[in-house]
Image: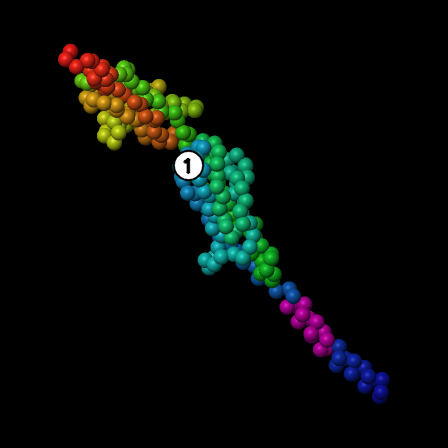
């Protein structure tokens, strides 16, 4: 009788212990996995070669909340180059020296296990189609400098790309005043404008290129065109009474 009673007491002790240990195992195995959505934007699209721009990623849960950790890798799928890394708390990088052409940029979020039992799963943005335009050289020249008031002068604009002749249009200005708008470039990237209406004095002439599918809009260096200045100076230098 005593042996049977002891076995009964042991059984009563073992069953609660098994129940307690089983509950602990179940509690430890509960993991909360949160999926993520990743989007990517650019501060400039198209961007201009040799000019910095910013790529910004946003990582959220499907409910729109933020994520509590992890990092982001920015990848150029076109060249397979890693453009940079950023912490999810400040998910942006400044990009410089991206070569001209079309690029597919992607943001990869690493995920995070820093807040167990919460696991934030990795995510990847859709590729951002980014165009980088080459910055051409715009040169403005004059057929004659100086000139007399009312004299005919031809202004020539040449737009030179790094790999090909630029296409499109240019606008000529005298200061803020438009001399000729939307002059078409020829096959060699050149446009000409002839005028006899430049006002007397030093004229600050510029040419602005409007850009095309491969080249960014660009402004020329000013051309200082003298209109009658030399004649006025010579007249002022003459002795009085002559």
Q: Nearer the viewer, residue 30 or 83?
A: 83
x and y, in percent, of residue 34 in the image: 54, 58
- Image position of 176 with respect to 84: above or below: above
Q: Picture quarter containing residue 33?
A: bottom right
Residue tagged 1? 47
Q: Residue at x 18, y 18 (%)?
A: 150
Give the camera-side residue of 3 and 63. 63
- Residue 241 picture location, percent across and down: 14, 13
Residue 10 counted in the magenta span: no
Residue located farthest toward the bottom when viewing the structure as drawn: 1
The residue most toward the left is 241
Question: In the structure shown, which secondary structural element does the residue marked by tag 1 occupy?
Answer: strand
- Left or right of residue 148: residue 71: right
Magenta stretch: helix, strand or loop mostly: helix
Crowding around mark 1 (Cα neighbors within 10 Å: few <14, some 14 to 19, many 20+) is many
Residue for point 41% across, 36% down: 47
Q: Above or below — where is 57 with respect to 216?
A: below
- Hey, which quadrant is residue 163 in on the image? top left
Report if residue 25 lies within the magenta region: yes
Let me know if residue 181 appears in the view: no
The quadrant of the image that shows the C terminus is top left
Is residue 122 toward the left or the right of residue 223 in the image? right
On the image, the x and y values in percent for residue 50 come to 45, 33
> Which of these two is toward me, 57 or 230?
230
| 116 left or right of 48 in image | right
Q: Which residues are magenta?
A: 15-27
């Amino acid at each position: 009788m005593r042996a049977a009673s002891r076995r009964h007491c042991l059984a009563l002790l073992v069953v609660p212990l098994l129940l307690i240990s089983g509950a602990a195992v179940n509690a430890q195995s509960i993991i909360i996995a949160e999926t993520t959505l990743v989007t990517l934007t650019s501060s400039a699209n198209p961007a201009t070669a040799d000019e910095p721009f910013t790529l910004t990623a946003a990582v959220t849960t499907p409910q729109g909340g933020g994520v509590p950790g992890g990092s982001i890798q920015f990848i150029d799928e076109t060249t397979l180059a890693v453009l940079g890394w950023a912490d999810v708390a400040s998910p942006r990088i400044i990009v410089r020296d991206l070569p001209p052409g079309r690029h597919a940029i992607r943001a990869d979020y690493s995920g995070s296990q820093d807040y167990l039992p919460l696991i934030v799963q990795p995510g990847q943005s859709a590729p951002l189609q980014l165009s980088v335009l080459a910055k051409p050289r715009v040169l403005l020249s004059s057929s004659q400098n100086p000139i007399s008031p009312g004299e005919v002068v031809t202004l020539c604009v040449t737009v030179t790309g790094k790999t090909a002749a630029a296409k499109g249009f240019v606008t000529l200005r005298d200061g803020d005043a438009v001399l000729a708008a939307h002059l078409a470039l020829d096959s060699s990237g050149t446009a000409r404008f002839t005028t006899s209406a430049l006002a007397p004095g030093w004229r600050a002439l510029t040419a602005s290129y409007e850009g095309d599918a491969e080249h960014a809009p660009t402004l020329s260096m000013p051309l200082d065109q003298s209109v009658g200045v030399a004649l006025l100076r010579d007249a002022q230098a003459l002795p009085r009474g002559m």
